[in-house]
Amino acid sequence: MKTFAGIEKKYCTLENAAILLQSIPYDGTSTWGKGADRAFPAFLEALENMELYDIETNSEVYKKGIHILPEIRENSSPEAMVKEVFKAAKQNLKLNKFCTYFGGEHSVSIGVIRAFKEEYDKLSILQLDAHADLRKEYGGTPFNHACALHEASQSCNLIQVGIRSMDSSEMKYLNKDKCYFAHNIHGHTEWMEDSISKMTENVYLTIDLDVLDPSIMPSTGTPEPGGMDWYTLLKYLRKVFRTKNVVGFDIVELAPQEGQKAPDFLTAKLYYKLLSYKFEKNEK
């Protein structure tokens, strides 16, 4: 059994854990920077070197219990991967625990979101991303990383934040009232409350790490300039968790680079922050 951040095994068992973490190391459709399939070991290593007391929330959320599930290793085709992820996510939801996922490229989110959509009526999807990911098909498949949120745009209440790159063909699927482009939100804060007001009670969060500026997150497949900074991202996420019921989340597109530990550590810290925000109400 893998342990989370080197914590005591009693906090890592399935029986004792309130939180599930599953790796989906799929990188079959990425078109430029590769390596997202190697992200999980780098993430785990960074976790083991991170302090587990969170100053901001005055909590040690690991004591809620974090169980690492077996990886989903299906990589024969994008279609097969999405099918297997959907099946696993459905099974995980039956366990009545807080389910989290770690990519892999962004196409891994398709199957997870499908499962959550079946579980929760009127589900909102909050996408933090540099790219719109709304193509109906790309590279001969609708299960490409460039199509990661197309299905959700048709079946869920999709809120997009940080977008700063897209193809003109995606415009017909874009809801401009619920898309907060990076150049419009930079240096402002009113967009935070506005975007939250458009969410339903239950929210699934999908974070592509390229939403962050490449000055602090260079280890992604396509590091787009003009991204969010660390504290703006955290301020927004804490507002979301305090206002809405975040039912699960995924973090995708970390592509570790040799000699660059900081992006791996940032990812580990972000994951732990999300858990701290989720369980903050229970810690008070």
Image (cartoon, rainbow, N blue to C red):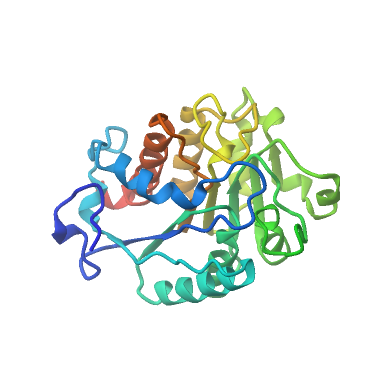
> Would you place residue 245 above or below residue 128 in this image?
below
> Would you place residue 19 above or below residue 91 in this image?
above
Q: Is residue 39 left or right of residue 210?
A: left
| Front position in the image: 227 or 241 | 227
Residue at left offset 76%, top offset 57%: 138
**Dividing the picture into quarters, in which one does residue 80 lie?**
bottom right
Q: Residue 187: image x %, image y %?
A: 62, 22
Q: Residue 236: image x %, image y %?
A: 51, 37
Q: Residue 17: image x %, image y %?
A: 25, 63
Q: Is residue 242 left or right of residue 211?
A: left
Residue at left offset 81%, top offset 50%: 170
Q: Is residue 62 visible?
A: yes
Residue at left offset 78%, top offset 45%: 176
Q: Is residue 117 visible?
A: no
Q: Residue 44: image x %, image y %?
A: 32, 47
**Dividing the picture into quarters, in which one does residue 21 lie?**
bottom left
